Amino acid sequence: MTPTPHSMAETSATQVILSVMPDPSASDTVNLPGAVPLEWWNQFYSFSLFERWYTVASGDPFDTSVLLWTRAAPVSTASGEVPDQSVPVCVSFKIFNNQKLIGRPIDSGEAFTTYDVDFTVKFEATGLQADTKYWYQFADCTNPKTVSPIGATRTLSHPDTPASLVNGGKPLTLAVFSCSQYQSGYFNAYGVAAHNTSADVFIHLGDYVADQSWKAGTANSNDSSTGCSWSPSGACFTDRKMAAVRAYHEWMPIRQVAVDDKLRIWRNFQIGKLLDLTMLDTRQYDRDITDLYYNTDFIETLSATVQNRSIMGAAQEKWFYDTLTQSQSRGATWRIVGQQIVFSQLDELGVFDFDAWDGYRANRERILDHLYTGKISNTLILSGDSHANWVSDLARTYHCLLPLPSSHLIRLSDDADPNDTTTYDPVTGKGGIGVEFAGTAVTSSSPFGTGITPTAADPIEQTLVSANVDLQWSELSYRGFFTLTIDPKNVKATYYAMRNISTANLDSFASAVFNVKAGANKLDRPVAGGSVSAGALKSTASGSVILNSVPSSAVSASAVPSSVVSPSAVPSSVISASAISSSAV
């Protein structure tokens, strides 16, 4: 990715990201940092005062305002000497209602940035019209000819806008990503979304920068003597964590949700009466102890017996329930929940991941109970983290988990029924209360083997959809993303697979398409229209498995894992954890 502080990589790997999609056809396009080789965007670095613009980005749009972000580092001398870091840099911005930046700007301003904040700067552009597209640019206050690339952004609909009028009456499309590991390949998924879909908003569900996370309780993640000696600087874990949080807020184009709580990223966006987009933090905010790989038996016992165990903390959990209830009360058609990890119980060949929701069963049941008892309809949960594709009906299920010797994932005994579902019919979907769409990684490797081919993945996928009653589709080989196209009557989910992430390209295909009708609270039958192009689909007619129709020979092993962005394909949106972020072109 871009040259970023290591501390930023540590924190952004655990947080939710959301950003608004730019216009890839704008004249002064700029590549998303890290999405393409450095030489493709070095051309933007030659400015008289600023050594480099780390592109531009926008985030957290409301109906009348949006945040604008850039970084402008001072120029080094001819001899390579770094300028006096105590001298601040002045940056200005202007935002217009036209791509050519003609006429009087809608808003403008100036601000100083300094070494202390790594020369990053944010502005809030105000006085904007709801549901409207804008273009913006930064400049050197002392030399207005020194300008940044032009960014494209937009505002959201007013919360009271009728569902049929949101986005100008056109369906609103979200593109959903997770797990962008720099070392694993090119981020082609961003380019495909920018150029080959009609996405209006980007949502990133975590592992945005480095796909490297910490877990509270590990030896290097506490303030013990071991934890304080782990860092070359000698900084203890708490100090490292707070430095990471600071870097995160400096580098991401988002608002701080609470002045007195820098760790809070959970928030809600009311997008007209069409939907509420609720972003959660299920990774690091007041989460009860998780599976640290040496304590798996203990965590399994807690998960099975402790009724107040929470993956999000009491404050966030209560806020979430209130938000769901208020969303339905205000008349929003859809409730879309972005969070990091697979929500539904997932029996992965006889093992369960207690670092995900399977380690917080009581919390999951409380959420399902709230949906059922409150008769809260049209809830879609978005998930990442697993580096694989899963699509399930949301349903109340009752399971038996039995402890065995420690491992990251705990095995069930042979006589345990992993999915003893008493209120849900997987053939018709009756008894469901929503749908979960879980997406694969942009580049991070499949948990079933780096570079696993479709042929090798097929039998595993068949076993998984057979073993999990509410799981309707499994796909383990391809890297990619998915989109949600939302209107008042239907949500269509389209999964995209990247054929090759070893080079920058737009070579992809739609691997599966699903529909959810408003009020149905389940996947439309036949699921995926009865046919998919990759993975294994559970047949709703007989319980048998339908395999993909794309010949596995069409994809080489090296082409399977991940996604990239071609130079012309890179979106200007910078996706920032738990933020709604529009970005640059």
Image: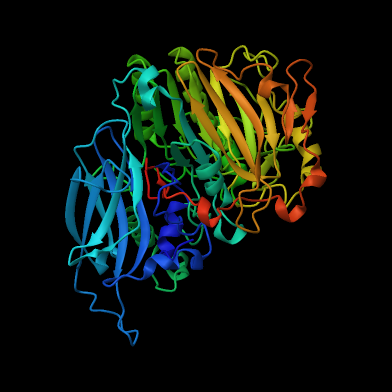
Check the image and report above or below for 401 versus 165: below
Question: In the rendering, at what x and y percent does residue 126 appear?
Answer: 20, 40
Answer whether residue 562 is visible to the viewer in this image. yes
Question: Exactly how many numbered labels are in the figure?
Answer: 0
Image x and y of residue 140, in percent: 23, 64
Q: Is residue 336 above or below residue 282?
A: above
Residue 222 point in image, percent of width and height: 43, 58
**Which coloring applies here?**
rainbow
Residue farthest bottom in this picture: 79
Q: Which residue is rendered at x = 80% and y = 43% of the image?
A: 552
Q: Nearer the viewer, residue 532 or 314?
A: 532
Residue at 55% over, 53% down: 565
**Residue 252 visible within the image:** no
Left or right: where 139 falls relative to 331 = left
The front one of 413 and 1 is 1
Instruction: Determine the image quadrant of residue 488.
Output: top left
Please name whichever residue, 579 or 164, is drawn nearer the observer in this view of the structure: 164
- Left or right? Give the position of 510 relative to 32: right
Q: Is residue 350 above or below residue 538?
A: below
Instruction: Measuring from the top left, give residue 364's x and y in whole percent.
Output: 51, 28
